[in-house]
Image: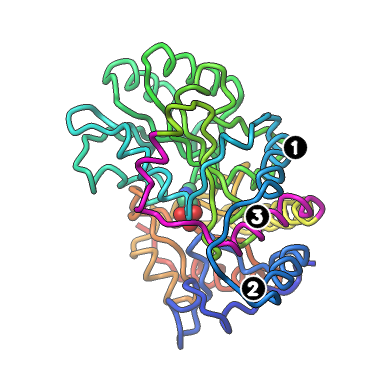
Amino acid sequence: MFARSAPRREAHSMKWARYEGRDILPMWVADMDISSPVEITDALQRRVSMGHFGYAKPWDGVLEAICDWVAYRHQWTIQPEWIVWLPGVIQGFHAAQKMWGRPDRATVVQSPNYPPLRRVTEKYQHAVVHVGSALSGNRWRTDQEQLHHILQQEKPSLLHLCNPSNPEGDIWTAKEMLRLADICAAQGIPVCSDEIHADLVLDPMPHSPVGAQPGLNEQSITLMAASKTFNVAGLACAFAIVPNTQIRKTLHQVLAYETGEVNELGLVATEAAFRHGRAWHGALLAHLKDQRDQLAQHLEGTSIRYHPAPATHLAWLDCRQWAVDPAEHFEAHGLGLSDGKDFGSPGFMRLNFACGTDLFQEALQRLTQAIAQAPLT
Ligand SMILES: Cc1ncc(COP(=O)(O)O)c(C=O)c1O
């Protein structure tokens, strides 16, 4: 099912356009070179064949599909009225920043982090404190002790979480979430959690949504989407889950006239994905896990240190032994990765391994060449 990559070079793909005319495999932005399931393309084709595209109103079926999926995947019972539509998750964490951020009280953000989230305070000139990460049990993880200390000492106005984390691909355990919820509830700190990668947990570990935590459900925004998992990010459709009525009202006010409505085709894809995508999703996770494990094997004993992560299709590569700029060196060897310095960690590179077997095997060969020719410090 995943032997051949989607022919994205032929479409208007941001990922492929970056290296147009150059022999560089794009393994940077976090979308997939994998075709969406036929259940989605069929639903889209049915809708497109109607031939009219006026303003749309989200319908009960798509809300039900989300509620059922979140219960099935994350054991969280949510109500349809808790859902607030967004064109993208980025708009969701920006809205949270506008609602809760303050110039004189810190916003807490993990680092390294997805660049737009790491820099979310800049536009509003709000104070920020970054929580670092450390190797723990052979995994890159947010430093929990440092985070607890900051939350207790700084009395921040807001905590942004990215869980599963991008770029590290780590997830929080249920116990860690409970502890976090206790602290935030006691301190009255609202939490906005970017959980866009929640359905890409490759190992048999549960994902714990922030909004499902007893202490946090009344003071949180949980952001999710079908976009990453089903490769429909270009259809611009995401959602916030907000159990608290007042927070929901404020969020609607902040979003009004700024973000615009979600695209109807995005709603169609979301409904089809969550209603009919379970089998395909299971197969996708197995494929990604297999490629993650092959990558780990391939890099073992080399000058790149890689600790396979339980979630996401992103590999966080430590290239600090190299005496060359890793981004330039990879490009010179035909690989286009994301530069760790944009995430707050120079010397690291992020490799997106969500492609078919064909491109992945080609990438492994190029990786071997790149490693063999990298001068070391
Ligand atoms: C952690 C994270 N949040 C948000 C986004 C962007 O989401 P959207 O396109 O829905 O705004 C990405 C895309 O890579 C991401 O990795």
| Quarter of the figure with residue 211 | top right
Callout 3–callout 2 Cβ contact below 8 Å: no
* Residue designated by label 3: 270
First in sequence: mark 2 vs mark 1: 1
Q: Position of residue 336 (x, y in %)?
A: 46, 70
- Is 260 in the magenta? yes
**Residue 24 pos. (x, y %):** 49, 78
Q: Amino acid at mark 2?
A: Leu
Whether residue 259 is in magenta: the answer is yes
Q: Which residue is mark 2?
A: 359
Q: Amino acid at mark 1?
A: Tyr
Residue at disc 3, secondary structure: helix
Residue drawn where x is 55% and y is 18% of the image:
178
Reading the image, the residue beneath label 1 is 72
Which stretch did the figure color magenta? 250-279
Say if residue 304 shows up in the picture.
no
Determine the CA span between mark 1 and mark 3.
15 Å
Give above or below for 147 relative to 267. Answer: above
Nearest the eye: 375 or 57: 57
